[in-house]
């Protein structure tokens, strides 16, 4: 096809057509560019990359305009970024390599823009670099690039309000991730204001940003603002996707967590129960872990209210899920259930749950202090059951283990 195209081009040149004034490389470059765009539309990014690389080589060889060379590099950097899979841990090395290549081409485009004093393209390069740093979770680099993009973007003749809002939001996220919470909140509030002005008060995009903002406010202990964000996002998601949609459910969960942390236990419990019902209706592999975590949180609220029967039921259900992965949360859940059994006067059952927890702690690395605390708790229960021989043997074992672990003495449970 390409040979036929070149033959057609040559025949026009030899007959004195107006095409004679067009350089042959331009047609070749346009062909590679059009092929790249065709593959990009189909989301066939590897094929697009091949044509973009050829187009870049030709443009550099023929000394094409700076804008053309910048655009090609930015398109290639974006194509590479889209082939990376940051969410898949098994591909971490490959993902980092691809994103590194994307960063290289983005920086090349920025350098060309700097040489030609093209501020528009320079800012476009910074925006793409921000996308790459966001994918890599390179928060310090993202904070710097967004600050620069905001500073220069404001100087453009016609600043794009949506891009400005995106930059402000990214800056807030980066500052939060870098531990600069006090500086992230003003940027976060400005971001929400800009997005609402440009997307409207009922936009699904705004709902996404409200959720992210709520998470940051919750982390920073600004629970009133966090709850306002989650409620607004919940209203939008419920209207747009339905009250039982994943978007609505995650807002409910966050809202319940914020209410619990701020002391509104009744409100938190009511929302946890609603979330639990919704999750159980849509039970699937992707929801099982969420349900178990929610059951554990709700159980602790019921323990605080003295509703031990409901707490026992919820913990028993969550243990069934936690057994799959084991680990700390399984051990803690066993011990929480043991406390409930002890408060109910069921000491033998409490001892059994503590033994289950002890096996989990023993299987984990660097959990010696938790294991010793567990064993002391068991020794106390054995004393209450008047099993002094077993209690003494267990305390002797604890003393030996403390010597081995070189751990400080663990206070007995009162």
Image (cartoon, helix red, strand yellow):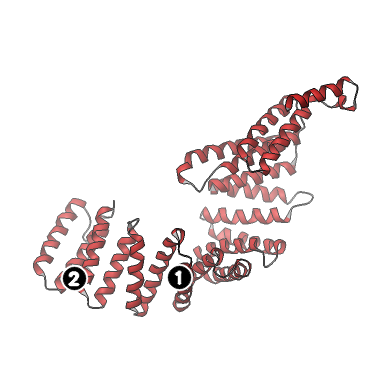
Q: Position of residue 354 (x, y in %)?
A: 24, 65
Q: Secondary structure at mark 1?
A: helix
Residue 373 can be seen in this image = no
Q: Residues within 10 Å of mark 1 (few under 14, many from 20)?
A: many
- Position of 330 with respect to 158 (left or right) is left
Q: Residues within 10 Å of mark 2 (few under 14, many from 20)?
A: many
Q: Residue at x 50, y 67 (%)?
A: 254
Q: Position of residue 17 (x, y in %)?
A: 90, 25
Residue 230 can be seen in this image = yes
Find residue 276 and name its label. 1
Q: Secondary structure at mark 2?
A: helix
Residue carrying label 2: 381
Q: Nearer the viewer, residue 191 or 101?
A: 101
Above or below 20: residue 99? below
Q: For the N terminus, give its image quadrant.
A: top right
Q: Position of residue 368 (x, y in %)?
A: 25, 55
The CA distance from mark 1 to mark 2 is: 34 Å
Q: Quadrant of residue 128?
A: top right
Q: Nearer the viewer, residue 75 or 396?
A: 75
Q: Nearer the viewer, residue 207 or 183?
A: 207
Q: Position of residue 389 (x, y in %)?
A: 8, 66
């Amino acid at each position: 096809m390409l040979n036929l195209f070149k033959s057609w081009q040559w025949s026009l040149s030899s007959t004195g057509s107006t095409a004679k004034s067009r350089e042959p490389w331009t047609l070749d470059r346009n062909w590679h560019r059009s092929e790249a765009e065709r593959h990009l539309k189909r989301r066939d990014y590897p094929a697009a990359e091949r044509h973009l690389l050829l187009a870049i080589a030709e443009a550099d060889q023929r000394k094409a305009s700076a804008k053309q060379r910048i655009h090609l590099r930015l398109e290639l950097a974006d194509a590479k970024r889209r082939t990376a899979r940051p969410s898949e841990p098994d591909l971490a090395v490959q993902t980092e390599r691809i994103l590194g290549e994307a960063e290289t081409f983005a920086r090349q485009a920025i350098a060309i823009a700097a040489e030609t004093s093209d501020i528009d393209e320079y800012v476009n390069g910074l925006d793409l670099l921000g996308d790459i740093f966001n994918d890599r979770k390179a928060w310090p680099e993202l904070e710097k690039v967004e600050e620069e993009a905001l500073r220069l973007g404001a100087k453009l003749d016609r600043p794009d309000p949506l891009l400005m809002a995106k930059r402000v939001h990214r800056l807030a996220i980066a500052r939060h991730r870098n531990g600069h919470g006090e500086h992230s909140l003003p940027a976060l509030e400005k971001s929400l204001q800009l997005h609402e002005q440009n997307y409207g008060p009922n936009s699904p995009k705004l709902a996404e940003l409200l959720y992210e903002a709520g998470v940051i406010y919750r982390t920073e202990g600004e629970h009133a603002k966090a709850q306002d964000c989650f409620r607004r996002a919940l209203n939008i998601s419920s209207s747009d996707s339905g009250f039982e949609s994943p978007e609505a459910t995650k807002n409910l969960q966050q809202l319940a967590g914020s209410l619990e942390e701020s002391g509104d236990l009744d409100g938190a419990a009511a929302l946890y129960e609603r979330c639990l019902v919704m999750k159980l209706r849509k039970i699937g592999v992707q929801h099982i872990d969420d349900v178990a975590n929610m059951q554990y949180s709700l159980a602790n609220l019921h323990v605080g209210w003295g509703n031990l029967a409901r707490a026992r039921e919820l913990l028993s259900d969550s243990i069934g899920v936690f057994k799959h992965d084991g680990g700390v949360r399984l051990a803690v859940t066993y011990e929480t259930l043991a406390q409930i059994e002890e408060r109910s006067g069921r000491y033998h059952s409490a001892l059994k749950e503590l033994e289950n927890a002890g096996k989990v702690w023993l299987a984990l690395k660097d959990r010696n202090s938790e294991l010793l605390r567990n064993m002391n708790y068991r020794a106390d229960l054995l004393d209450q059951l008047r099993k002094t021989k077993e209690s003494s043997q267990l305390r002797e074992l604890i003393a030996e283990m403390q010597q081995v672990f070189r751990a400080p003495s663990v206070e007995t449970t009162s």
